[in-house]
Amino acid sequence: MQPDSILTTHPVSATRRQFVRSVIYGGLAFYGLPAFARASKPPLGHVVIVGAGFAGLTAAKYLRAWSMGNLKVTIIEPNPQFISCPQSNLVLGGSRTLDQLSFAYDLSRKQHGLHWIQDSVTSVDLVNKQVQLARGNLSYDRLILAPGVDFNYSKIPGMSAPVADIPHAWKAGKQTLQLRQQLESMPDGGVFVMTIPTGAYRCPPGPYERACQVAHYFKQHKPRSKVIILDANADITSKKGLFLQSFNGAYQGIIEYHNNSEILRLDAASKTIKTDFETVKADVLNVIPPQLAGKVAQVAGLNNVDGRWCEVDFVTYASSLQADVHIIGDSISAGLPKSAHMATSQAKVCAAAIIDLQTGNAPNPLPVFANTCYSFVDNQQAMHVANVYRYDPAKKSMVSAEGGGVSAKASVQEGEYAQAWAENIWADTLT
Amino acid sequence: MKQIYARILWACIAIWSLSTHAEDSSATHTLAASCAACHGPNGNSLGGTPTLAALNQAYFVQRMQGFKDGSVTSTVMHHHAKGLTTEEITALASYFAQQPRQTAHALPHQSFLGAQ
Ligand SMILES: Cc1cc2nc3c(=O)[nH]c(=O)nc-3n(C[C@H](O)[C@H](O)[C@H](O)COP(=O)(O)OP(=O)(O)OC[C@H]3O[C@@H](n4cnc5c(N)ncnc54)[C@H](O)[C@@H]3O)c2cc1C
């Protein structure tokens, strides 16, 4: 295959009609631009985005919108549809179905004139500025890696590879349904054990939200059953006081929280875990594995923080190792919670910076953005953590501004806000 | 050459967008875009939170300053307002006031296809 063969097999050189249609964004058609700006070759270059999750899809949309269609954007994503991790714990609790969290990509793709390749990137040629796919190579002017997380099973003693009936359900999809089915077929009086890894992982409050959702289901349908959390961390890593209100309140006698409980030995056949303190046998076992940057970032050699995460410049999200490769979302090392809101905010800063760089302008040196993250403790009540983050050039990091914080307690009102958050972030990402 | 071409183009875009978005800087539209997770694309909420698009500028400032100094009580917004400067609040007010109110696209729901 020729290096650029994919380009020729896909509708790259848009006709003028297609081009004009693709730059109509948010009700704005830019009739005021001179004729040369509407030429079919995108004047600001070609950005290839690996991964159409929260980060990648958002970057694609805003690159097109803010460049008024003058950047060509190609997305590479193997999955045929978007499945939201946010709210996937509610599928375990029984108040959502996976269908409610599944979305088509078509609208975003058409609306923003994205070139779309349903495939996986297997490697990156940083020198020749090309990504390799199963079906050939594709050249880029700038590359955005947004592959989410990969799981490191080699760190789990006794379970060095995935085991079919021990789901992680940490990427929403089949495994979410599998875990729900296991909970449904578990007899009353059974034990659900969930392990939480140390170090950064996607969605810090996510495991505790999951414990509440499983406990909510047990409380209604299997009241003699237990949830045991084996947390390798020294303490609850997010919204601690709020989760303790639920663990010691509504779910007292159902949820047991065990800290410093690193897995010393896991026996997959008997679903037994040995820690420093005890040996626990599960009826349903959910191992959330240690995590690192998505595989493609590892293959590209850009996971330069502890061999796990990617170091980037928070003004442009360029890799510290490779100026024309930008990395956004869960794969980066930011010292910030890995959340969907964070991923979309990073994507927007990155998109604005890429447009500036491609036009020879200096990107905004002091990015600011917000993060709000809700957790549901049952089918109705939720609680938040919310912060503004601003770039600190001296520390070279995004630091949380004063005044952020968490709810006083979980409430039905915040449950409604949490639903509004989900629908609005889905709309922002997918339309 | 390519660079010069790009700069000319950018100048055109900048002039065009200036005429429609008077005080909108890239810093402001990027910050404003991070409100979308709760308040919808370009401030057009799908429901459950206020729509910020085309909101009266003075009202936006009054509410946000109130959340910031604690004179207006809120569930969540004080955690954001306190983290923003008065200049940022003013810039956001002006940005959102200029955004058109639009009927949001329906979410592209689809049944789970079972692939992932
Ligand atoms: C149970 C759970 C609950 C959560 N709840 C919340 C919540 O309430 N609020 C919140 O803000 N966040 C929540 N999160 C976190 C949120 O889901 C992640 O932070 C977010 O998905 C990160 O976005 P991303 O784009 O980096 O990764 P993803 O959304 O995972 O997207 C990565 C994409 O890249 C694709 N990809 C990977 N490798 C390749 C390759 N080689 N080639 C092509 N494509 C590739 C993948 O198929 C995938 O589509 C939750 C997470 C979990 C697991």
Image: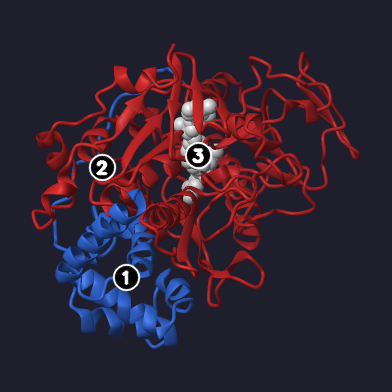
Chain colours: A red, B blue
Indicate which label's residue lies in the foreground, 2 or 3. Answer: 3
Is A42 positioned to the left or the right of A364 in the image? left
Q: Amino acid at mark 2?
A: Thr
Residue visible at 60% across and 52% down? A312
The answer to which quarter of the image holds residue B31 is: bottom left
Residue B20's place in the image compared with A377, above or below, is below
Pointer 2: what residue? A431
Few, some or many residues within 10 Å of mark 3 (<14, 14–19, 20+): many
- Percent from the top left, x then y, of residue A58? 37, 45
Tell which subunit mark 2 falls on: A
In the image, are marks 2 and 3 on the same chain?
Answer: yes
Mark 3 and ligand 1: say if the CB distance to the nearest ligand atom is below 8 Å: yes
Pointer 3: what residue? A146
* Mark 1 touches mark 2? (CB < 8 Å): no
Few, some or many residues within 10 Å of mark 2 (<14, 14–19, 20+): many
Residue B25 badge? 1
Q: Amino acid at mark 3?
A: Ala
Q: Amino acid at mark 1?
A: Ser
Label 1 residue SS: loop
- Percent from the top left, x then y, of residue B13? 22, 60
Which of A117 and B80 lies nearest the eye of the viewer? A117
Which of B59 and A148 lies nearest the eye of the viewer? A148
Which quadrant: the C terminus of chain A?
Answer: top left
C-alpha distance separating marks 1 and 2: 24 Å
Label 3 residue SS: loop
Indicate which label's residue lies in the foreground, 1 or 2. Answer: 1
Residue A170's place in the image compared with B15, above or below, is above
